[in-house]
Amino acid sequence: MREIILDTETTGMDPAQGDRLVEIGCVEVLNFIPTGRHYHVYINPERDVPAGAVAVHGLTADFLKDKPVFSQIYTDFLDFVAEATLVIHNAEFDMKFINAELKRVGHKPIPDKRVTDTLAMARKKFPGSPASLDALCRRFHVDNSGRELHGALLDAQLLAEVYLEMMGGRQHGLGLAQQGQSGAQSVDFVSVQAQQNRPFRPARPHQPSAEEQAAHEALLVELKDPIWIKR
């Protein structure tokens, strides 16, 4: 099962009021194991970035002015996402921006059925408890000490760790260890070296000895109606 953990940063709260995307970050997960593949892009919003938004993510209009506009990157974004489920914290917010940008370039929207909202999951799983990304990082002991400002890729990476914990932890399923950048899976069983250092022990014989057979027959004499004699 392929899932994409996704986060965005924007110029504000509402695309219907002219706010735009400024950053997209995605992390790929296969069968609840991060693959090491990711997608990240800064986007020129073709407008100013209000001071309130800069205070959240630190991305100024001056920094973004030479970055590609959405129409230049959306095909790469869609190619990376492909048909995977999108896992997003407070998905309604991010998806209204993504679909507004897709509509702007004449592309059909991504349907809600392809989206998993971890905010809704957290509220259902921990009713009455804080459900922000920072709160979930604290709950699951995910290190978010580097999160001084919001950043789409960093937040997607943190959300990936939180999501895996919410789904049962990193050793989900059969207990396969996390994949590295190479994509190869390692299994945390006894190492080959340890097996090579084991002392040699001959196979135990399964055929009973004459003494064992005699002791068994003597025991049967003492038992009332033993099933072994009926065989």
Image: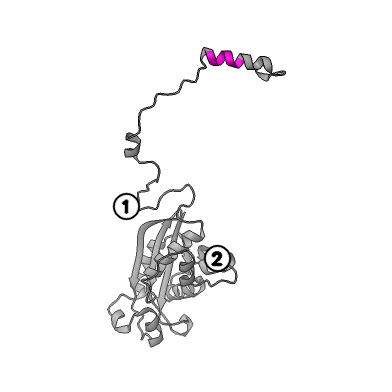
Closer to us: 200 or 143 = 200
Q: Tell me, yes or no, whether the two marked residues, 1 and 2, touch with CB atoms within 8 Å.
A: no
> Picture coordinates of residue 153 (x, y %)?
37, 68
Tell me if mark 2 has few (under 14), some (14-19) or many (20+) residues whose alpha carbon lies within 10 angstroms of its own. some
Q: For residue 80, say whether it is visible.
A: yes
Instruction: Find numbered disc 2 in the image and state the secondary structure of the residue it sits on.
Output: helix
Query: Is residue 132 placed above or below 202 in the rendered structure?
Result: below
> Picture coordinates of residue 106 (x, y %)?
43, 73
Q: Which mark is residue 121?
A: 2
| Outermost residue to the right | 224
Query: Is residue 227 placed above or below 123 in the rendered structure?
Result: above
Instruction: Find numbered disc 1 in the image and state the secondary structure of the residue it sits on.
Output: loop
| Displayed quadrant of residue 126 | bottom right
| Displayed quadrant of residue 127 | bottom right
> Rounded to the nearest whole Å, what is the CA distance between mark 1 and mark 2?
31 Å
Circle 1 is placed at which residue position?
A: 182
- Point out the stretch of residues depicted in magenta: 211-216
